Amino acid sequence: MTATRIDGKAVAAHVRAEIAVKVKAFEARAKRLPGLTVVLVGEDPASEVYVRNKGIQTREAGMVSNEIKLPGSTSQAELLTVVAGLNADKSVDGILVQMPLPKQIDTQAIIEAIDPAKDVDGLHPANAGKLNQGIEALTPCTPLGCMILLEKSGVQIAGANAVVIGRSILVGRPVAALLLAANATVTIAHSRTKDLAAVCRQADIVIAAVGKPELVRGDWIRPGAAVIDVGINRVPADGGKTKLIGDVHYASAAAVAGVITPVPGGVGPMTIACLLQNTLTAACYREKIDPKGLV
Ligand code: NAP
């Protein structure tokens, strides 16, 4: 059996096109555009590329995009002042502070300073708590992207055994909560899990969010399972170059799985698409518009 490759780029483009239509509907009702502000502290090249792409895709979807660039020497108090200003700014629907932050800044303090209503990263404890109670809330973007990929690939989630490898607040925990909300039976595995291979072999759905290159092998995968690889690992390649690979050994897993995401081109493109979706959702909540009833 050879798995069907899930084309995350194509799904993300489709999601962004749907959002662009909904943004027009939002504008017609609210008489304004949704707005996202991204705050970048320091000059991490990967973060700069990511923030630039966010800006381009936000504008392409018809929304207002703003970027605030602060020096790497910015103090926690200075960043908190910027966040407080954005919380108070009526034109801002979504605030995203790009991670990782310089080490003088307590990341959790910043997450908790963002108004939960504008928390398009879905990391504020108020939003994480709602997600875990099954209450509608702004939800972290990458987990949302994983769920859309499963749904668009026709994977049966209700009743499925899902194994999530990783328990970070960014990916593992929220994707497990979303799978549970969709009626999967969910196991969360982590670095202390005994016999991870045997745990994975029970899974109809495997979500790998570990950060360990090609940890998950083909013989860990139940025939026909859905495999979503969240991992992004930069490793040495031929000719002194580097390349990106996932947490799943693609070739061996694709020989057994039913559907599988590649790296790159799988989950990655979904993250920004879901950020746009969250910005529109936040704008709808603020305008008391039902986001599901936009078009
Ligand atoms: P993280 O915060 O480092 O968490 C990694 C998790 O994996 C932890 O819960 C850890 O367990 C677990 N783990 C580590 N080694 C393990 C092992 N040998 N066996 C089982 N579990 C193990 O990472 P993250 O932020 O969740 O990100 C995970 C991966 O996804 C990274 O490669 C990251 O680059 C990628 N990512 C991609 C996107 C995207 O847009 N596609 C977005 C976010 C992250 P403990 O809790 O026990 O330490």
Image: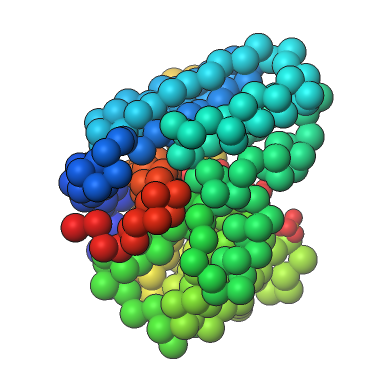
x, y (%) of residue 69?
Answer: 56, 16
86 relative to 125 in the view: left or right: left
Q: How many marks?
A: 0
Frontmost residue, 141 versus 184? 141
Report the residue at 60% width, 49% height from top. 116
What residue do we see at 53% from left, 44% from top? 118
Image quarter hosting the C terminus:
bottom left
Q: Is residue 24 visible?
A: yes
Q: Quadrant of the N terminus?
A: bottom left
Q: Residue furthest bottom?
A: 159
Instruction: Report the coloring of the rendering.
Output: rainbow
Image-based side of 2 in relation to 242, left or right = left
Q: Position of residue 86 (x, y in %)?
A: 57, 30
User: Percent position (x, y) of residue 124?
Assistant: 65, 50
Q: Return the x and y of residue 219 as percentages of the image width and height.
A: 49, 70
Position of residue 199 in the picture relative to residue 113 (left or right) = left
Q: Which of the 4 quarters of the picture holds residue 31? A: top left
Q: Residue at x 66, y 31 (%)?
A: 84
Above or below 127: residue 221: below
On screen, residue 241 above or below 282: above
Q: Is residue 205 above or below residue 91?
A: below
Q: Nearer the viewer, residue 25 or 199?
A: 25
Q: Work out whether residue 261 can be spotted.
A: no
Residue 210's place in the image compared with 184, above or below, is above
Q: Which residue is at the front of the view, 56 or 280?
A: 280
Q: Which residue sits at x=48%, y=21%? A: 67
